[in-house]
Each structure stands twice: as C-alpha cells, then as structure tokens.
Image (cartoon, grey):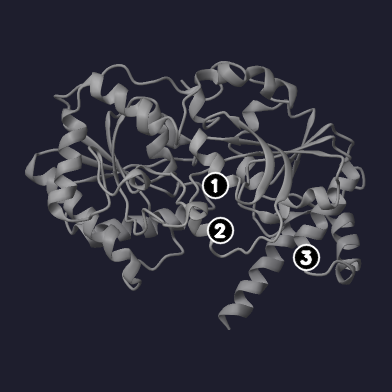
Amino acid sequence: MIKFKSFLIKILTLISNLNFDPFFFKKKKILVYDTETSQYYKNFFDKKKIFFHSNRIYSPISNVNFFVLTWSIINFFFYKNLHLSQIYSIFVIAKVKPKIIITFTDYDFFILNLKKFYPKIKIIIFQHQQRSNKILKKKNFKNKFIVDHVCVFGKNLKSYYSQFLNTSFKITGSIKNNFYKSNKKFNRKKKELLLISSFRPHINYFKEKVSNFQIQSLKNIYLFCQINKIKLSILPWAPIEENHKKYYVKEQEYYKKIFQGDNYKMLKKNHFIDSYNISSKFDYFVSHNSTLGYELLSRNYRVAIIRKEINYTSKNKNNLPVIDSLTSYRPKGYIWTDSCEKRETFRVLNNIIGISKTRNKHFINKYVNPIMMHDFQCENNFKFLKSIGFKVKKNVYSK
C-alpha cells in the first residue's frame, strides 16, 4: 500500500510538471544539467544564453516537456539499464545541441557517462558537497569515465575523483562560498554558538544504531552551553518554504526530543541558500562534518568538527583513504574529534573559543585549504569560469 501511494504521488507530480510547448527547446551553447542542484547557482549565469535541464522528472520543481517525454517512453525498451529520466535527458540534449554541459551533481554516475552518448560535447563537473569513499565502496568501476574538467573544493579531492574519472582538475573552492568575505572580527565576549544541523528527514535517528554517535554528541554540546552559559542556536537543514515545511517541523521535533529543554533557539530560513547569510552573523560553530562547516573554516570562522570515523590508515598504498575531512588527517586534532564523549566535545568547543589568530591562520593553511580553498570572488579562476559561460560578478550572493 505504501509503495503504491509513493508511485501514485510520483505520477501525479510528473503530470503536474508537464509543459505542452512544442517550441520549448531552443539551441543553446551551454546546458546546465539538473535544476535540483543548479538552482543554487542560477545567479552566475545569463539565463537567456543557458538551458537549465530538469532531469529529475518526478521532482516538484522540474519542468518536463510532454512531447520529448512521450518519445522517451516509446523508446524505453531500446535503452537497456536506463531509467526513463535518463532516456529523457539523452533526447533533451539532442534537442538543445549544446557544446558544453555543466553540472553541479557530481555524484550522479549517469552524468559522468554522457560522453558515451555525446563524445564531442565538453563535460564540466563542479563539486557540490563534501565527498568520501563511502559512496565509492558501493560501486565497482571497470573503467574510468572521461570528463573534460572537474572543479573541486581543494587539492586533496583530486585523489577522490581520480579513482573513477579521467579528467583535468581545476581547484576552484566552493563557488557559492567564494562570494562571501572572510571573517576578520571576533567578539569573544559574545557567548553564542551556532550548531549546523546534520538532520535529514529520511533517517530514523532513534531506531538506527549509527545515529547514537550524533545524538550523544548533541547532548554534550547542549550540556556544554548550559554549563558555560552560552546561547545555543540551531541552523536547520530544512527551510520553511512550501516544499520543505513539513521537514522543518520534523526537525524541530527531533531536537526537542534530544535536548528536552528550551534553552536553545531554532532558527528559520526561507531557502537553502539562506544558510550563508545567517551563518555570517555568528563567529563560533559546531558541525558534524557538514560542507558549510568547512566553507566557514576556509573563511576564518571558528568551527569545531565532530565526526565519527573508523579506518584512518591502510597498508595498501593504492587504497589510502581520501583526506576529505579533518578526522581523515588523524582521529583527533586541536578543533576536531572522532569521539562523541563529553570530555572530547568540551575540549574542541573550548579550543575554538580560545584559538589565537596566528594559530588559526596556520591551521587553515595546513589543514583546511587542501580540503576547502576560499577563492574570494573567484579571482584565481575568473578566466576559466568566464570561458565556460559563467557571468561572474561581485556580490552575487553576499549582502
């Protein structure tokens, strides 16, 4: 019954997404693949010159052409091992005829294989979030995919993508993060800590054993703030916009059950991108290895990282772990830990409050930049970005 209901919702969503414009597709030089991730980068492009492709045909924000979808359904049995949405994407590309395909969906392996269908089109992939080997353990790659360029957060991520891609790398940092300034002023008297929420609605945190680490960590963070009379605020994962409001309510209930008190503030954001402007108002943060946490670290904010990690070393030199987080360097450091215990939680939180400017600068250069480089206003990569259709300008996001 649950599966049928889910299927019915998908079909109804797809029907509501349909457009019946026979002239919907126009030839464009650049196609940006996946409106789900590219919605955060639309300000960087001249929308008149770019075609934004909605490949997730069942997503509420997608715009799906009826005629191409119908043709995809007719050809469904001629494309073995492909989903309908992937076949639809193949025909959309044929209609638009782009010379360049850009995507921020770096974890979709069908996108990585587009050269198989369109070998002459230049494929450029931007890293969108932190990555780890956990994703790759589920895959068995016989051959590497060919991609023209991959733009990564930092030099360490080259070793991750090199495991399955034959490509040319550009170290760009996080494009969104690059348009926010570094933090130069700290108010140590202002006792506030912002918790970057790692809540996700599809996880049942109170039934899955793997969630015990995070729950215990959160309880110790709350206790630290209570003892030290520090104001604790939570930056939620879910925005309060229409499509995610139910998840925000669920997230509220999650923290209410863990903290069992009201000595914290649950913030609100209208859209996902609002996290950048909200976080810029704080100095001190704690994160369970979120991408935003590393973006803030790269901009000189004080962030404690608490992340569960198991295997740090390997005797097989060809299978060394990717240094994608601070706990990948070693289990414990000055502002990070792989433990959820009270003593360790208190240690890293005290350290971010007391760290000196000199030590913090050294720390960023040595440990953070290889994972997340901050290239303010994309100065180091301006020419490259402009050559592939970016309309890079000042103050795209920052206020």
User: Around disc 1, counting alpha carbons within 10 Å, would you say few (fewer than 14), some (14 to 19), or many (20 or more)?
Assistant: some
**In the image, which disc is placed on residue 38?**
none
Residue 296 appears in view:
no
Label located before the other in sequence (2 or 1): 2
Provide the secondary structure element on which disc 3 rests.
loop
Quadrant (top left, top right, bottom left, bottom right) of the N terminus: bottom right
Residue 142 appears in view:
yes
- Residue at image mark 3: 82
Tell me the kind of residue under disc 3: Leu
Q: Which residue occupies 51% across, 44% down? A: 129
* Between marks 1 and 3 in the image, the one whose residue lies nearer the viewer: 1
Q: Where does residue 79 sit, x and y in percent of width and height?
A: 85, 66
Task: In this rendered view, identify the residue nearer to me: 377 or 229.
Answer: 377
Q: Where does residue 59 sit, x and y in percent of width and height?
A: 65, 56
Label located before the other in sequence (1 or 3): 3
Provide the secondary structure element on which disc 2 rests.
helix
Q: Are marks 2 and 1 in contact (CB under 8 Å)?
A: yes
Q: Where does residue 198 sit, x and y in percent of width and height?
A: 37, 51
- Residue at image mark 2: 136
Q: Distance between the residues labelled 1 and 3?
A: 26 Å
- Residue at image mark 1: 160
